[in-house]
Structures are given as structure tokens and as C-alpha cells.
Amino acid sequence: MKFKVSAQLGYAAKSTGTIILNIHALRTERQKVLEETFTITPQTDAEELITATTNNRFIRFDIKEPGDYNITYDALVDNYFEVHNYKKYTDISISNLHPDVLLYLSPSRYCQSDKLYRLAENEFGNLANNYNKAVAITKWIHNHVEYLSGSSTSETSAYDTVAQQAGVCRDFAHLGIALCRALSIPARYFTGYSYMLIPQDFHACFEAYIGGEWLLFDATRLSPLNGFVKIATGRDAADASIASMFGDINNTTIKVDCQFADEGEFSPFYHYPSVFDAVTYM
Amino acid sequence: MKFKVSAQLGYAAKSTGTIILNIHALRTERQKVLEETFTITPQTDAEELITATTNNRFIRFDIKEPGDYNITYDALVDNYFEVHNYKKYTDISISNLHPDVLLYLSPSRYCQSDKLYRLAENEFGNLANNYNKAVAITKWIHNHVEYLSGSSTSETSAYDTVAQQAGVCRDFAHLGIALCRALSIPARYFTGYSYMLIPQDFHACFEAYIGGEWLLFDATRLSPLNGFVKIATGRDAADASIASMFGDINNTTIKVDCQFADEGEFSPFYHYPSVFDAVTYM
Amino acid sequence: MKFKVSAQLGYAAKSTGTIILNIHALRTERQKVLEETFTITPQTDAEELITATTNNRFIRFDIKEPGDYNITYDALVDNYFEVHNYKKYTDISISNLHPDVLLYLSPSRYCQSDKLYRLAENEFGNLANNYNKAVAITKWIHNHVEYLSGSSTSETSAYDTVAQQAGVCRDFAHLGIALCRALSIPARYFTGYSYMLIPQDFHACFEAYIGGEWLLFDATRLSPLNGFVKIATGRDAADASIASMFGDINNTTIKVDCQFADEGEFSPFYHYPSVFDAVTYM
Amino acid sequence: MKFKVSAQLGYAAKSTGTIILNIHALRTERQKVLEETFTITPQTDAEELITATTNNRFIRFDIKEPGDYNITYDALVDNYFEVHNYKKYTDISISNLHPDVLLYLSPSRYCQSDKLYRLAENEFGNLANNYNKAVAITKWIHNHVEYLSGSSTSETSAYDTVAQQAGVCRDFAHLGIALCRALSIPARYFTGYSYMLIPQDFHACFEAYIGGEWLLFDATRLSPLNGFVKIATGRDAADASIASMFGDINNTTIKVDCQFADEGEFSPFYHYPSVFDAVTYM
């Protein structure tokens, strides 16, 4: 399915410095970037970083003099998701998990799974399998946590969200990840453009590794699961932040858009707990 | 009802210093101390502190030379509790609460009610009145939190216990207090000797102010509500700690006992959520 | 010395509820309230609460219908402070502290002295006496913590301020209190009107109990120590908050003023570490 | 230089499960594993995991029935370190850092550099270059933090250690990493066997990326910088834990040894702040 996505970011630099952005659509087997433009005004050289540890697309550029900088990113992306049925499948034991997946079992900065395992066991431990557990976790978060702009900060973690019961998409995702890991289900953070999200913004949700696939869960229920253009995955928001600024540089504006750009009608797919179908992008 | 209570505490002092104990049975209208002995070995002068702000019985004494010190406290206490029925009663609005009670609405060190109000509202906000809410809170804690020695420290707060779901009597009490206050129900910490508690130790639970009475709740369900000899009340454990040591002084041993010392049979009274009766000591 | 103080507070009530204010000038031996008016618009009955545990002046009133409410407080206050010299004095041992003062040795919500005693010992433990320690603590905070509006929240505690090194007057006060208590110096929170504070606002600082007096310290150095009109004291901000609202009620505006209203010239007195003089109001 | 290292670990398994160990000597250009044996009693199959993101050597094996398990690891390792002089060198700007190094600039679970940047700037911001800063950080930690077994837990982070000023090698390392990153110096966690460490145990310290090399720093000063056999590196202890157990499995014993096994005399090299030499292993 084709989507047109765009992001416009403004920065006020009071000093020289460096910015690293992570707003480019990911290139994967299932997501092709058909067209893409990236401009910085005033014109500034930028490089795409290639790392050994992740295929997230980090763009680095230097701010060589103080001033206002505007970034524009536009892309036409073609991706496809699959919907699998998880009524009958077999959990993968830890001893059979691919080594690259084990990383996503560990607690991380915002997902202190080691401190939430009793909660996870008490609420979800008796469910039949990892799919049921992940679905129940997503539902529990949706029911217990209020989506409330401004209720959390960049320091808020899953541990806080359990107690405070309010947050934004990032907090919903962190809590989902932490509860999955507490039950030995690998889980990771996912950022992307999101069609039909109101208001438009970068969105975050989480993927759980179930039956050999990374399944997508969104406890906010704010956008259809089949309307995403993936930007990045990571252990939590610390691995996939939209922008890192080094120097006295502040973000001033942010504008995001995601449009359906394919033939036919878009048929939104939301996950309902009663259904055994789940969406996977990769 | 008469109880014989005793406490034996050992301290190793590597320096001179001061110890303040709070182990004496409280003297109230409903609790008479019939006999009482308090000794320090080697013999040391001690004074009972009289303060303007609390009638808790603090005993202060100086450690004038390093060494081992043993404290023995024995008392015969006669107290009575009342069992009231709360099927029909009227909640007291904040505007009618006695000023001395308002203090117990504020968040405190271990009871961060200001950070738990969404949880409290979500779980208990719809219940009919403060009695029902306090009963439901007690039941919820009993069902969600595991009593587990060593699972918490002196820094553990209600905020932690919500996430970690394990603790000791002190943690159960703090969580009960925090959730009550989050719903504008005054609540305070209570320490005492506790008949039939196994193993014998100082016990902590909480009182909620409902219908003009301080009602006793024990989310641990480890001892009968009518088997207490009250030592102290306060905002939380910071106000009612068994011992405060100033200097290089450590507690080495602790032994506590509480025996029924009245005629007839002791008939243990545990609170059950289905019943509208509640125990009040004062 | 006479000061005219005033406060104007606006509240938007979306529900009925209750407000408790703590903005009235304290009445003490050394602070006389000569004139005072307090009005609520629209007209609303209010009562001053008399409690057994504090002489802070809490004013309680009910919001009987939703709407906008404006509070005006004006007072003419005559107080005097004393300046004592602490070059030669004797520390009071814990065994000789008045029982009512012991309370201010304990850790509290925002002042976790029990977690900061190594820091306190390492930085200040070798100083000659409690006066020198309190002066050094005040200076250390001034040098290490940046005064920065918006850098802290109502949840920020002394523990956080040690690491984050930024805060507002409340945070400076909490850290001072915590470090004093960690060294067994009783310390308490102080709120007041403050002449020459720019911009005008309620101010917070701390008092340490030294040589039998409560001495005033202000690590922010933002206002003269002899320009205060005392509102309240307490263990920390939890005991002395300007306003507590019960119901869906929000503060919308706040305006504070403090003018010198006596004959002659006001001669501002700031504390300098090299001097052995200290200010006490009570 | 050749070292013989060994580790013996005991586990009590009350259930089936999986253990992942990270105790094998790392294989790098500068560290050769000459001989190595690894046994599990009772005999159990184990596999070495190969991951895309790290060359740490994780060993995974299943516990197929409850019981006691003993692990023995022995190795003969030949490694070499270099001592470079950093009197004259050029800091690498963020825009020139290798992409794989950027990861080590981000805050992580135990190293909240984003919350400590004012502290870092205030204490070290004025120093001439990254080498001087890293040396000063190491010295500052050594002077401010007490090495005290049992003073911290697996949840203790750099943020805590700043306030509590006590910890073990892991805490010293986390604080060093966090302060480096707060100054935009890449830093990572390092675990290893350590010759002359008393008592023998796994040791942790940190590496800072300076002038294109990973330099080794040990704020504990408990062992010579040239006596290490490297096991793992990572963002913090969450990436390099000695053992991860899945199931009801507990570690019961741990015994570690590291002996010099080369010709000649071992000449211990400790870092002194006045010297511009630094050790790098890789």
C-alpha cells in the first residue's frame, strides 16, 4: 500500500552543533521507499549513517553557525503488512529464540520489566499463550491508562505509567513492552508515520515477537494498524528518538503528515481482542 | 480486653549517641496501661517525651559509652474497640472535617496520594461511599500485593508497591493510606502489638476516617482486627518508627510478644468485605 | 518593621468543592498582624482553622457552584527579627533538644535526609559546629544549583535536586533542609512574603535550629533575610502549600506584593558566609 | 600478556528454564583465547550465540529438569594493551564520530546522562579536552563515592549514586559513563576478569572514546588497568550481565580467579591523574 509522508521540522540554533534525525522511512523487505527528498534550509550537507547494529536511518548534519534551520522530508512509500491468524500456533521457547531477538527480553531505560514481573504474572500469567498475553496487555493498558497530552515527560517510564495511569503514545508503548518482557515475550519500540492519526504526529507503538513474527500492537487505539509507515525500531524511545541535538539547539516547530496514496479505498484495520488476527510488517 | 505485651530490643553502640524509641503502649480513652516496666541494661536514664503535636510515647535516652544495650518493655493493657455498622451513614465533606483531621488528607513521604489519584479513581471512584471505598481498597491490596519478607526496604513507598506488587505490613499500610487520601478519605498509619500475628513482630496497618471515626483496616489479613494494642499513629512510617538512632548504633535483636490476658475466650474478628461492620479503637 | 502585603488569587471551578488556603500572615510573638482583610468574590463564607498541631493559618471555604472565584488578601504586619552572633555558642545535643523540635530531624516527603547523609558528611561533616555547617550548606546549594523557573515540578525532591542541579526557591529550601537533617540539625520549611524579591511571588526558604533559635537561611540569595513576612512553617512544602483544592478547581492567576511600610529606610541584610551573624524571626 | 582465568558458578533450579551466561573471554584483535574449557554438571548441551549487534560471547543452555547445576569455565588468554600519551591529541567532534560509536552517547537504563548534564558541566565543563574531563570524572567519583559492598542493588543507577555516594564497581562504572555522555564523550560499560583484585570477583569499569580509542578508566582504583581480561562491553550493566536466568533458577555460588601466566614479572599500572598516559585494550 502506498503512502505519502512528510515531516517539517524547525530548529533554532544558538550555537554551532550537530543534529541527528531519525525521520526517514525505513527500507525493509516489506517497505520500499519509492521516492524521497530531504532538504535543509539554509542548505547544509547531511550524511546518512550506516551502523552495524541497526538499520534505522539516522541522518547527521552540522550546524556551522547559529540561526534558524528548517528541515523538510517527503517520501512516497510502498509497504505491505500481513495479517496472520494466531488461533493455533506454538510459542517459541527462549532456548529457540534467534540470538538477535534475545536483546528485546532485557529491561531497558524506559521499560523496567524486572520491576513489573509480579504485576505481569498476576494479571496475565494464566493466559494460554504469548499471543493471548500480548493482546490482553494491550487491552489492559487501553483500559487503565488515559491518553492525555502533557501528562508525562521525557523521563516518564513504564514504572511510572503503571502508577500514574496517564500518558501519550510513547508511554503506552513503553508499558506494553515492559509487560511483555516481564513475561519473557520479546518486545520492541516502533515509531512511524500513521495514517488517520488525529492530530497528525509521529506515532509510537510496540511490536511483540510471537510465533516467529514481530506483531504490531497499539494500546492507544488511535490509528489503524494497517496505516503505518515504519521509521525505526529499538529497545525503547532511547533507541529511536526523532532527533538528537548536540549544542544549544532547540526544536521550534514540527509538522507531520501521512496520506493514503494508493488505488482503491483504504480499509482501516483495528485490532479487537476477540479476534485472533494480528498485523505484522516485518 | 486485656493483653500482655512485651518487647526486647538489643543495640550495639560503636559510638556514643542517642536512641528514641516508640514501643510503649499508647494511653488513650479506650486504652489503659494497667502496668508497665521499661528497663535498659546497663542501667541508663530515659525520659518520656511530651510533645504538642502527638500523643505517641517517645522514650529518649543517651548512650554514654559504646557497648551492647538491651531494652525490655512489658505492659499489661486494657483496651476496647467498638464495632459499628456502616450500612447507613453519611460521608463527612471536606468542609466539615475537623481541622486536626485534614492533615491526613495530604500526601506524605511514603504515601504519594497525589501521584495515584487516577488509579484510585479508576478502581474505586464509582463506589457508593467512603466506607465501601476503604473496604474495596483493602481488598484490592490484599489481592494484588504479595506479602513477602525482604521484598521491600525502608525506602519503598506506596508508589513502588503499586508497580512491584510485593511488600510487608508497612507497605500494605502505606498503599492503603495513599489510595484513601487520593479519594479524599483521611487515612493514617497505625503501629501496634498484634495478638495471633505469626511470627510475632510489631505490626502496621492503617486507619481511615469515616463517619467521624477512625476505622481500622489491615490489608495483610494476618491478624484479627480486635487483637491490637496500639503504639502509635502518624502520617506514615516516618512518624511512627519503632526506633531512631543517632550515632553509630545498630539494632541487633528484636523480640516481640502479645498475649491475651483476659477472662473468657478470645474471639478473633477479621474483616470481610461483605460485612458492613468495622472496628474502631479510638 | 512594618510591611504591607497582598495576594490576589483566581480560581476556575468546574465543579463544587473546597479550597484551603495558607496565605495569611502568621501571628507570633514577633509578628503582629495590625490590619487584615480577606475577601472572596463572589461572596463566600470562609473559616480559619484552628489545629492542635500547627499555628499556620489555614482558611477553608466551599465552592458551592462552578464559576470563577477571586480571592484578595491584604495585611499590614509588624514584625521584628533579631540578629545574633554565632561565633561562640554551643551545639544542642539531640538528648537536650526540645521534644517539639525532634520532628524536624526526620526525613520527609521532599527532604530525604536518610538518603543524603554520606553526601552531607563528605561535604560538611568536618566543619566545627552546626552554625558553620548550615552556612556551608547554604553556600554549597547556591553554588551548585541553578535557579531556573520551570526546571522542577511539584514532585521534585531534594534527592532530585542534588543530581539535576536546578530548581526554584522551593527546591533550594528542600535541599537545605535535607542536608541539615542528614547532619542531625533540625530544619524546617518556611514560606512568606518577601520584600525586594523580583519578580514578586510567594517565597520559600528554610530555618535551621541552632543554639536554641530557628535561624533563617535562603540559598537562593534572591531577597534580603530581613524582608520577610512569615506565612507558615512545616516539615516541607507538603505542610505549607499555598492552596489545596478539592474538586475540579484550578488556579488561574496569582499576584503577590510586599511593600516596606515603616518609617526610615529599609536596610537590606543578606547573609554572607564570612559573617557569624544570623537572622531569627521566632 | 598471558592470564589464566576461571569461574565456577552454581545454580539451584526449582523449575525447568534457560540460562544465558556471559563469562567467556572476549575474542578480539588484541585478545586471543589460547585455551578454553566450559563444562556444565550434570552434562548439558550449550550453544554460543552469534548476534549481529555485539561480539560479546553469550552461552545459552536449557535446564531440562530441576536440580543443582555447576558451571566451570577455564581459559588461558593472551592479550595486550597499549599505553598512549594524551598530552597532545584532538577531540573528535560528534560530526566525525563513527556511526557505531554514537550509540554510546545516549542515556541508558543505568546511565541517565540526560539528567546529569548540569552536574557534569558544572564540575568538568571547563576542562580543556575530553581526556582531561574523563580523568577528572574518574577522580571525582573516586573521591566522592565510597566503595561499600551491599550499599546498592540491581536497580541502583548513576542518578542514585550521585546522591547516595556509595556503591560497588558497577555503580562506579555507571556514574563514570553517565558523566562522560553528559559531556558528549562516548562511554561504555566493561566487564572482565581482573588480576590482583581483592577479593577476586568479576570486575566492572568503563571505557571512554577519546582520540579514536576506547580508553579504560576504573574509578574504584581497586585493580591495575593492565591486569584485565575482557569479557564484554555494552551500554551499561543491562547489556553485559554475567547471567540471565529464565525460570525459577537462582545463583547459589560464584568463584572467580585470574592469575598472571606469562614470563617475567607483572608490573601493575594504575592510573594517576597527573599523568597523560592512558590504557587501551581495543
Image (cartoon, coloured by chain):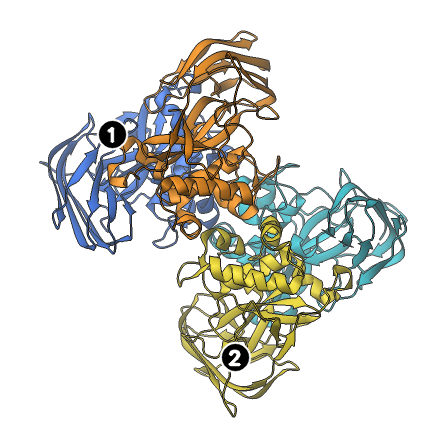
Chain colours: A orange, B yellow, C cyan, D blue
Q: Chain of mark 2?
A: B
Question: Which sits in the foreground, C86 or D232?
Answer: D232
Q: Where does residue C271 sit, x and y in percent of width and height?
A: 68, 47
Q: Does mark 1 fall on the same chain as mark 2? A: no
Specify whether D58 is left or right of B180.
left
> In which quadrant of the rendered view does residue C150 lie?
top right
How packed mark 2 is, by other alpha carbons closer than 10 Å (few <14, some 14-19, many 20 or more), is many
Answer whether residue C211 is visible to the viewer in this image. Answer: no
Q: Quadrant of residue D260?
A: top left
Q: Which residue is mark 1?
A: D281
> Which class describes the residues within 10 Å of circle 1: few (<14), some (14-19), or many (20+)?
many
Measuring 42% from the left and 40% from the top, which residue is drawn there? A134
Work out which quarter of the rendered image holds the N terminus of chain B and state it: bottom right
Are the residues flagged by discs 2 and 1 in contact, CB closer than 8 Å?
no
Q: Residue at x 29, y 46 (%)?
A: D246
Residue D282 showing in the rendered view: yes
Q: Disc 1 marks which amino acid?
A: Tyr
State the SS at label 2.
loop
Please count the marks in the image: 2
Q: Nearer the viewer, residue A197 or D126?
A: A197
Q: Point out residue D10 in the picture as x, y percentages from the top left corner.
A: 20, 52
Residue type at mark 2? Answer: Gly
Please tell me whether residue A36 is drawn above or below residue A273 in the rendered image: above
Which quadrant of the figure has residue B28? bottom right
| Helix, strand or loop at mark 1 | loop
Residue on which disc 2 sits: B227
Q: Classify B4 as above or below D205.
A: below
Q: Position of residue C176 (x, y in %)?
A: 60, 51
Residue D56 higher or lower than D198, as above or below: above
Q: Compare residues C15 and A57 and report the one nearer the observer.
A: C15
Q: CA distance from mark 2 to mark 1?
A: 66 Å
The residue marked by circle 1 belongs to what chain?
A: D
